[in-house]
Image (spheres, rainbow, N blue to C red):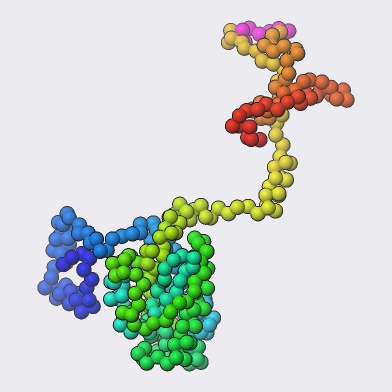
């Protein structure tokens, strides 16, 4: 059996039954799996998205699930719980074959991104929502093949209004304007992309009262391709850094201007040997390397910033600034 083969529910039940009765040994299966050194790669299931990007998509739809929970709870006035069950990438043809032959299909665009996105809703969920909108208790029924025009309009409106939450969920990555384009019940009549095209499928586990089911979002790779670089963790870390507002900038500048910095003026400098330093006595004179006529170096902290000349102001020692020292690339340090 290939590691990429999808088991039907009956095959899963048979496998579990064989393990429980002892017909199949789990330890032998594990040893057989560990002995395999060659990993089968299916080019039809090429992985277009990294784990990092899948985590970002999951994070976005976790937020979408929370927004949907709040929105539907207010609209339907009943207990709603929506959460992300899984996020997978697989060929579009495989996704279509995995959903019911008759289901609720909402097709919308994520303008300005090109391409269409599919929202597949389990009929049980859709009917429970429609029943609540029409004043019922939220009872579900499955008569998808005989939807009336009124029922179609009610169901499509419910999900069309929910797209505002999808816009909000994506706003940290890209500004989109979701627009509902089509409503279908048969996935065979809906061809978003070629069957081998990679899509990301986000499955949302949905509970409405006593009714539960799945809402699946199918995002083709061609739709996400322009924003794939933005789905990395590096971009998320950068996007959290917001530019300060003008008012904040002025306040920061005002506080900086009040900050005190040490200012010193050097009359000159001299070099001594250790022997000369140890032999210094009271009254000794140290000859400086600079001349009396040379300008003084005025430092801000330890950085030479100005040249000046000594003087007096109201019988107090002072330094008059003559020029600014140009330090090249470090010129804007202060």
Q: Position of residue 242 (x, y in %)?
A: 58, 54
Q: Position of residue 282 (x, y in %)?
A: 71, 9
Res. 13 in view: no
| Res 11 quadrant in image | bottom left
| Res 294 quadrant in image | top right
Q: Is residue 157 left or right of residue 254?
A: left
- Residue farthest right in this picture: 314
Q: Is residue 262 left or right of residue 170?
A: right
- Residue farthest left in this picture: 23
Q: Position of residue 112 (x, y in %)?
A: 49, 65
Question: Magenta residues?
Answer: 276-284
Q: Is residue 103 left or right of residue 131?
A: left
Q: Is residue 100 above or below residue 305?
A: below
**What residue is shown at x 51% (from left), y 92% (from top)?**
135
Residue 96 among those drawn in magenta: no
**What residue is shown at x 39% (from left), y 58% (from top)?**
53
Q: Which quadrant, please, contains the N terminus? A: bottom left
Helix, strand or loop for the magenta stretch, by majority: loop
Q: Which quadrant, please, contains the C terminus? A: top right
Front residue of this view, candidates 38 and 79 = 38
Q: Is residue 110 above or below residue 263?
A: below
Q: Position of residue 192 (x, y in %)?
A: 36, 72
């Amino acid at each position: 059996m290939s590691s990429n083969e999808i088991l039907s529910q009956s095959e899963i039940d048979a496998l579990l039954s064989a393990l429980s009765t002892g017909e199949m040994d789990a330890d032998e299966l594990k040893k057989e799996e560990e002995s395999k050194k060659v990993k089968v790669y299916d080019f039809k299931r090429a992985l277009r998205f990294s784990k990092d990007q899948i985590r970002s998509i999951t994070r976005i739809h976790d937020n979408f699930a929370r927004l949907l929970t709040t929105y539907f709870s207010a609209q339907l006035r009943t207990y709603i719980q929506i959460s992300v069950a899984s996020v997978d990438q697989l060929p579009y043809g495989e996704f279509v074959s995995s959903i019911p032959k008759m289901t609720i299909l909402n097709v919308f665009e994520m303008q300005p991104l090109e391409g269409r996105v599919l929202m597949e809703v389990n009929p049980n969920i859709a009917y429970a929502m429609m029943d609540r909108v029409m004043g019922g208790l939220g009872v579900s029924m499955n008569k998808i093949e005989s939807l009336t025009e009124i029922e179609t309009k009610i169901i499509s409106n419910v999900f069309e209004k929910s797209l505002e939450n999808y816009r909000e969920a994506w706003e940290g990555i890209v500004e989109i304007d979701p627009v509902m384009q089509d409503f279908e019940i048969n996935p065979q009549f809906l061809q978003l992309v070629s069957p081998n095209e990679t899509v990301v499928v986000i499955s949302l586990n949905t509970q409405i009262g006593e009714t539960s089911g799945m809402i699946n979002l199918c995002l083709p790779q061609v739709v996400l391709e322009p924003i794939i670089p933005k789905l990395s963790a590096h971009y998320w870390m950068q996007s959290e850094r917001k530019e300060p507002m003008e008012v904040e900038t002025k306040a920061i500048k005002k506080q900086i201007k009040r900050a005190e910095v040490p200012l010193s003026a050097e009359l000159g400098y001299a070099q001594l040997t250790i022997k000369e330093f140890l032999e210094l006595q009271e009254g000794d004179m140290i000859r400086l390397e600079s001349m009396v006529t040379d300008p003084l170096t005025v430092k801000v902290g330890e950085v030479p910033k100005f040249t000046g000349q000594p003087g007096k102001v109201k019988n107090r020692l002072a330094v008059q600034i003559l020029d600014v020292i140009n330090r090249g690339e470090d010129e804007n340090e202060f």
